[in-house]
Image: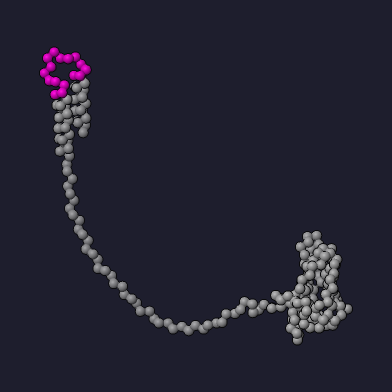
């Protein structure tokens, strides 16, 4: 390839000198003939160079691998296991919940009447939840809620004799209340629940 490059440079240098140099007195060859000769020589050199390049020898064919025999699947026999399952009836999630805890005590409960007074001794508003445990015989039960203002009270005349749980609470940061009390009433007289910040006192007539 280096020889071809030198040949082209020599030919074109010669053509340039002839074209740009002084005209000879008696030219023996024309410019067109010089160009044709240079081109022919260049193509001849290229052909000779290509012919001198060794040709690639094809590789011998590779052996084709013979297919391997296909493996057959053999099913294994598993031992038979007999199992007996006993169905367990579902247990109701509410079976352990006291139905009275979700029942609102009506304004006309069944049973022997009594009178209850609830007194708030705290200088803040409180909410009082009154819960009647299930009474014997009538089976009355349930709860009510009352809101009492600061040092306020309420007189309840439509309740029945039985055992009561009271819970008083508020969200007042200056006078917080979270108090519980319990008492059983067995006559129609007036009974009192007195609320303080941390306790509810029960007293009879």
Identify the residue at horizontal 81%, vertical 71% (top origin): 200
- In the drawing, does residue 136 fall left or right of residue 76? right
- Comparing 88 with 74, the one in front is 88
Region rendered in magenta: 17-33
Q: Residue at x 23, y 64 (%)?
A: 67
The x, y position of residue 18, in whole percent, is: 18, 19
Instruction: Establish if 14 lies above or below 61.
Output: above
Q: Position of residue 103 (x, y in %)?
A: 71, 76
Q: Kindly tell me whether residue 67 is visible in this rendering.
A: yes
Q: Quadrant of residue 182?
A: bottom right
Name the residue: 78% across, 77% down: 107
The one of 66 and 158 positioned closer to us in this rendering? 158
The verdict on residue 162 being magenta is: no
Picture coordinates of residue 55 (x, y %)?
Answer: 17, 43
Is residue 3 rendered to the left or right of residue 160?
Answer: left
Residue 78 occupies quadrant: bottom left
């Amino acid at each position: 390839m280096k020889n071809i490059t030198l040949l082209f440079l020599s030919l074109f240098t010669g053509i340039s000198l002839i074209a740009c140099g002084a005209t000879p007195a008696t030219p023996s060859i024309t410019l067109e003939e010089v160009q044709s000769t240079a081109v022919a020589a260049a193509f001849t050199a290229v052909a000779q160079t290509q012919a001198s390049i060794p040709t690639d020898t094809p590789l011998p064919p590779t052996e084709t691998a013979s297919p391997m025999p296909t493996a057959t699947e053999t099913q294994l026999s598993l031992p038979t296991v007999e199992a007996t399952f006993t169905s367990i009836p579902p247990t109701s999630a509410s079976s352990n919940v006291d139905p009275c805890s979700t029942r609102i005590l009506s304004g006309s409960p069944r049973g022997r009447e009594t009178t209850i007074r609830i007194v708030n001794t705290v200088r803040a508003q409180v909410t009082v939840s009154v819960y009647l445990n299930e009474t014997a015989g009538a089976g009355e039960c349930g709860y009510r809620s009352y809101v009492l203002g600061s040092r306020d009270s309420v007189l309840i005349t439509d309740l029945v004799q039985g055992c009561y749980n009271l819970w008083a609470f508020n969200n007042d940061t200056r006078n917080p209340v979270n108090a519980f009390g319990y008492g059983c009433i067995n006559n129609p007289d007036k009974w009192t629940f007195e609320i303080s910040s941390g306790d509810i006192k029960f007293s009879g007539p």
